[in-house]
Image: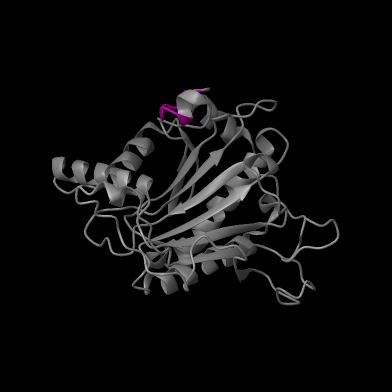
Amino acid sequence: MPADWCPFCPGSGNVPADYDVFLYPNDFPAFSPMADPFTPHQYAGDPEDLFDTTGARGACDVVLYSPNHTLPPSQLTLESWRKVVGLWTKRSRELIAQADIAQICIFENCGEFIGVTMPHPHGQIYAMPFVPPTVRTEFDSLARYASAHKGACLFCDLLSKEKEARERIVTENDAFVAFVPFAARFPAEVLIYLRRHARSLAELTEAESGQLADVISIMRRKYDNLYGFQLPLMMLVKQSPTQAHATPYHLHVQFLPLQRSATKHKYLASIETGFGTFLADTSPEDMAAQLRKAEPAK
């Protein structure tokens, strides 16, 4: 990035001269409304199909959190986070209505260690024409669990057990619970679950949207207080695929911080990347205790 120019800053000519939060079309989209439609691969036993291609019709947006170029997300006001959640919700509703969209992926990459070259506080929204592999795996697990437990939601039952145990809960409010998962893949991984069952941001009440902003704000401040610097992390808002009305998917937020300690990063090396097996660096109970002590400075 040039030292004296940012396309997301007021005055750049790319964004309004005055804004709080703003939706900006990605300049280098992986998915575009102008692309050819997506056609799922069928293979049908024909080896030539193994190298077939298809269109990538969808959308890619940038969500600008603030006009302040150097403001860390942890320093956003609660009102700013409420506006961000409101923008996520508004855009999700617009994309759900589009027939070509199968999955809405809201996420943020934060920190140079993640590979971020743009320090301006922002996240992204990818509207994909297919359901990505991880979500399909989640759906398979949900379906198996529901079949074995009279239609129960795996997310709801997991949250119930976490509330009983309490030792991995980091923070909570009337609508959401944030906890370090029992099978955490990253040392300071945290999940934020909605207490009641709902599939998407569009199903939240106004009060619940405000409480989601509140718990995200608390977690971001806790993370940056954990070791005394801005923690490199990924934040994902995970919603049900747009056409999946019967399967009991559960809205949740996932934080994946890439730090093992104050001086060590969590690298995804051969055993994680090549074999999909994550090695625990700390116990989830110990990390939850550390995060509870990391007070979210005002």
> In the rendering, at what x and y percent does residue 86 appear?
52, 68
- Residue 103 in the figure: left or right of residue 9: left
User: Which residue: 64% across, 36% down?
Assistant: 294
> In the rendering, at what x and y percent does residue 65 appear?
65, 62
Q: Which residues are magenta?
A: 273-280
Above or below — where is 42 with respect to 63? above
Q: Main secondary structure of the magenta part?
A: loop
User: Which residue: 35% across, 62% down?
Assistant: 102
Determine if the magenta segment contains residue 126. Answer: no
Q: Nearer the viewer, residue 73 or 195?
A: 73
- Residue 191 in the figure: left or right of residue 265: left
Q: Nearer the viewer, residue 293 or 209?
A: 209
User: Which residue: 40% across, 67% down?
Assistant: 202
Above or below — where is 189 with respect to 56? above
- Residue 200 in the figure: left or right of residue 90: left
> In the rendering, at what x and y percent does residue 128 appear?
42, 61
> In the rendering, at what x and y percent does residue 264 appear?
66, 26
